Image (cartoon, grey):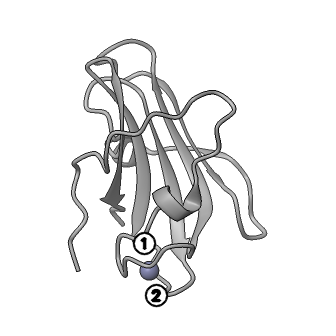
Amino acid sequence: MSSPNKKPLKRLTVKPGHMVDPSDDALRCPNCQEPYTLHLTGVTVFRRDKEDSTEGLFIHTPLEGTDCRTRTLSDKERKMNPSSRRSGVRLSVWCEQCQSDDYDLCLANHKGEVTINFQKRER
Ligand SMILES: [Zn+2]
């Protein structure tokens, strides 16, 4: 089993209106590598007011469960922004195969690109 890292998964171009073909592009669980097992469980948004700013909008919203209240992130949680200087988004995932909820699918602005990778969630 390969270990997840902060490198982008691969170059991916998605045209408007195009649905990624799961048979070719299915995201695999970063823990067990199984396809078709991931569930989105939460969204965390890190929106900096400007590049390098520590101010902005930093919120988390669960997508599953009974308590779906949006909350503002703590200072410690703000450091989980996948982008070191700009804005980013973490999509929390849970795997129905191995039950892992240790990883987030992360989107980050980096030098004019949007990178996508799995990162281990800090607890
Ligand atoms: Zn798994």
Asked whether mark 2 and ligand 1 are closer than 8 Å, the reply comes as yes
Q: Position of residue 62 (x, y in %)?
A: 65, 57
| Rendering coords of residue 38 (x, y %) | 55, 70
**SS category of the residue bearing label 1:** loop
Marks 1 and 2, how far apart at CA:
9 Å
Q: Label 1 amino acid?
A: Cys
Q: Is residue 49 left or right of residue 68?
A: left
Q: Marks 2 and 1: in contact by CB < 8 Å? A: yes
Tell me what residue is drawn at x 50 percent, y 85 percent. Answer: 99
Q: From where the camera sits, is residue 26 visible?
A: no
Instruction: Please tell me which residue lies in front, 73 or 81.
Output: 81
Q: Residue furthest right?
A: 66
Kindly identify which residue carries mark 2: 98
Q: Quadrant of the N terminus?
A: bottom left
Compared across the picture, whether 53 is left or right of 62 comes to: left
Which residue carries the number 1 mark?
Answer: 29
Task: Identify the residue shown where x is 33% and y is 18%.
Answer: 53
Q: Is residue 28 above or below residue 61?
A: below
Residue 87, compared with residue 36, is above or below; it is above
From this viewpoint, which residue is outermost toward the top?
50
Q: Secondary structure at mark 2?
A: loop
Visible in this render: residue 102? yes
Residue located at (33% from left, 39% from top): 11
**Residue 121 versus residue 81 in the image, above or below:** below
Q: Residues within 10 Å of mark 2 (few under 14, many from 20)?
A: some
Residue at the farthest bottom position? 98
Query: Disc 1, ligand 1: is the CB inside 8 Å?
Result: yes
